[in-house]
Amino acid sequence: MLGTLNFLDAAKRREGAALVRRGVSFSLSQSFDMNGPQRGWRRRTNPVHTMLDTGTDAALGNQGFPHGIGGADDVIAMPLQCSTQWDGLGHIFDHGKAWNGRDAAETVTSDGDRVTGIEHMAPYVAGRGVLLDVGRVIGENGELPDGFAVTEEHLTATAEAHGVTVGRGDIVVVRTGQLSRARRDGWGDYAGGPAPGLSFTTAGWLRPARSPRSPPTPGASRSGRASSTMPSSRCTRSPSPTSACSSARCGTRTRSRRTVRTTGCTSSGSRPHLCPSPGPSAPRSTRSP
């Protein structure tokens, strides 16, 4: 019923707790305010925060509380896709089917998600976390360009660069650098446009497997896979001082931030670099709208 969350058992949580060396916390949240990424696409808005009672009301003594007591009260109206989110399994459907082959029409109705809501995950998501900073290892200046599709090779190369291993039941957080860019340059068309993210070629990382090298459980990005097999949409870079790729599929390297479809291109003895993929077989980001 819980899928790969079944791998997050007591032993896995003990393993994660044993790794703690410093009591430092890092927030992955977004501010719930009007400066968020939404611009009306799919009728979504940024959070609207309205104060119902304030300190001014309390100072005037017109709130009706006895003994001089006063208080503040407020309300927030927002779509659930407005800011920070962890997708529930009822968000996306495939040919009318929800997760685990359920009928989408019966799984998510006007009453909400009846079966696959995110609330079912809440008691279980605690264990060993692994940060894969793909933006720093693969990108330039710590960021991947918009539309960059992270492949299983990028994840493997990043893990090797960090000197970490990813095993069954691990919780993987993939950093692309998109948030750093949004905080610096603004959100732009992020809510309805291209953004770096995991490609469909990484989906096997979520496959329930039983070997010690099997993939992680949930991730902050949506999917992943570990393999050394190079997909057909990849190309190799010949050793040269130029940034051009040797494969006809790849062509000249382009570093435009607005590139919609890109693929990794590797050279022997060096880290993967970024190059655009003109063909339809290029892996694409799975970032859900």
Image (cartoon, rainbow, N blue to C red):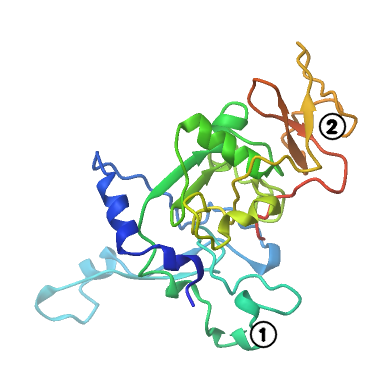
Mark 2 or mark 1, which is nearer the start of the sequence? 1
Around disc 2, counting alpha carbons within 10 Å, would you say few (fewer than 14), some (14 to 19), or many (20 or more)? Answer: many
| Total labels drawn | 2
- The residue under label 2 is which amino acid type? Cys
Query: Which residue is disc 1 drawn over?
Result: 103
Residue at (59%, 64%) from the top-left corner? 45
In the drawing, does residue 61 fall left or right of residue 280? Answer: left
How much space separates mark 1 and mark 2, taking CA atoms?
41 Å
Residue 217, given in percent of the width and then of the height, sits at: 49, 58
Give the percent coordinates (x, y) of residue 263.
75, 38
Question: Does dot 2 land on a helix, a strand or a loop?
Answer: loop
Residue type (three-letter) at the residue carrying disc 1: Asp
Quadrant of the rendering where the C terminus is positioned: bottom right
Pick out the residue farthest to the front. 211
Q: Residue furthest left?
A: 67
The residue labelled by disc 2 is 250
Whether residue 190 is visible here, answered yes or no, is: yes
Q: Secondary structure at mark 1?
A: loop
Q: Is residue 277 left or right of residue 40?
A: right
Query: Which residue occupies the foreground of this view, 243 or 213?
Result: 213
Left or right relative to 82: residue 51: left
The quadrant where residue 62 appears: bottom left
The image shows residue 180, relative to residue 287, as above or below, that is above
